[in-house]
Amino acid sequence: MKSISGLAIPVIAGSAMAFDAYEGYTIYNPINGQFSHQTTLIDNTGQVIQQWDGADSIASTPYLLPGGELMRPCRANGPMNGAAKGGRIQHFNWDGDILWDFTFSDSDNQPHHDICVMPNGNVLMVAWERKTQAEGQAAGRVGLNSEIWPTQIVEVMPTGPTSGDIVWSWHLWDHLVQDVDPSLPNYGVISENPGKMDINVGNVGQGNSPGDWIHVNALDYHPVLDQIVFSSNRLDEIFIIDHGITTEEAAGPAGDILYRWGNPSNYQRSGDHVLWNVHGVNWIDPGLPGEENLLLFNNGNDDNSSDVIEFIPPLLPDGTYALDDDEPWGPVPGDYVFFYESPDFHGTHLCGVYKLPNGNYLATDGPNREIREIEPDGSIAWQHITPANIMRAVKYPFSILDPVDEFCPGDVNDDDVVDVNDILAVVGAYGSTDGTGDADNDGDCDSSDVLAVLAAWGSDCS
């Protein structure tokens, strides 16, 4: 275990301080108030580099894309309120022109919180889906006196300026277990079914979000593993599911939870309750220090302690995760790559953290409006105070604003000519899902890429 205490330095509201900070641009968006429609990009001095004005308040976190484009989830009318409700995705160019403005929200579906842009240009959304009180009771939920809205994750492919197709989905409702009534579906021993969700775990929300069950607040996608990770503050857990299967397969056993960590009592196995009100889980990107590790912000269950935790998940070569009989998934508490807490850095809700190329950690204390860059030794490299509460800030290299080469179908090796070398590049990368060998710009390297090269044979892409 590497336990580190943060070192405090003075912070002046609205200012930025930098020592051994990563040089780049930081993006954030207030989630409420008069600035909640406005996304801001700053440098390390706090100078505003660009701002985008959206039509609706942000739902959670904005993301910068190569070429300086912006993708952000924002609010839309729907059956659920509060809790960072979303339903609308806006894609802007650098100048603020809207490239895509898509809404997915109706009486039975309400996206909320986070989105994730995939390498193929599609977008993952986390959403609630309506189940009636009768449906909840029929699934074995005890004491239910309202609707219940479980989690779904959908992948939308942009098809026009305001349109998109749902090309993949995963539904928590397909992966339930209950031990209260053998006459009802999904009856079983909870501890023997860790890949399923106990229908009776956790509270069903009231107030602004009646029926909100597990309250997912962040998600991320790993293009090589073809897996999705998401966090639930209501259950104090993170979860990983398989994206490399069809929607139909995702509704069956192949769609069961691959890995979960933070609160083994949810699947009735003994072990420490580690996470409390967790937010902001993500994989560390390839090429960065600690690549493939998981990183999260553990808000905590008291008044003065939040944690930044980086750890190595028990990944096996086949893409599954090691789990011993009757034991919870690891790691054991304290077996971390990095652990940070500081009495002056505690967020009761919101928050998140990302790894930077120089090895630092960009953490956000959303309720207290602070963005803090933390060095591996626990010292503070940079701080910035935002004008209002935010969910998470994200920091990017300066190169994120560089112009992006236009895609030329068939030109896999970027030499501006479509020829036999592109066929060889496709063959060498065949089966990859990270964009390598992708001749038709769909994110995967398969037989369709061979056909794309042949169709464009001899093209001059210069």
Image: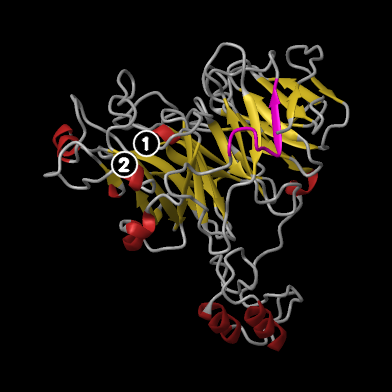
Q: Secondary structure at mark 1?
A: loop
What percent of the width, then of the height, locates residue 232? 45, 34
| Residue name at image x 33 percent, y 20 percent | 208
Type of amino acid at the residue the image marks with label 2? Ile
**Frontmost residue, 42 versus 359:** 359
Task: Determine the image quadrant of residue 150.
Answer: top left
State the extent of the magenta-drawn residues as a range: 332-341
Q: Tell me where residue 37 appears, x and y as whole percent.
A: 54, 27
Q: Secondary structure at mark 2?
A: helix
Q: Does residue 99 appear in this view?
A: no
Quick check: is 335 in the magenta stretch?
yes
Indicate whether 154 appears above or below 205. Answer: below
Is 254 left, or right, of 64 in this rendering? left
Determine the residue positioned at 54% across, 17% down.
348
Q: CA distance from mark 2 to mark 1?
A: 6 Å
Is 10 situated left or right of 406 in this image? right
Q: Above or below — where is 138 with respect to 100?
A: above
Left or right? Give the position of 391 relative to 376: left
Identify the image's colour scheme: rainbow, by chain, secondary structure or one colour. secondary structure
Disc 1 crowd rating (10 Å Cα; few below 14, some 14-19, many 20+) is some
Please name the residue that numbered disc 1 is placed on: 268
Secondary structure character of the magenta stretch overall: loop
Per the rendering, the mark at residue 20 is none
Q: Which residue is mark 2?
A: 190
Mark 2 Cα shell of 10 Å, populated few (<14), some (14-19), many (≥20): many
Quarter of the image with the N terminus in it: top right
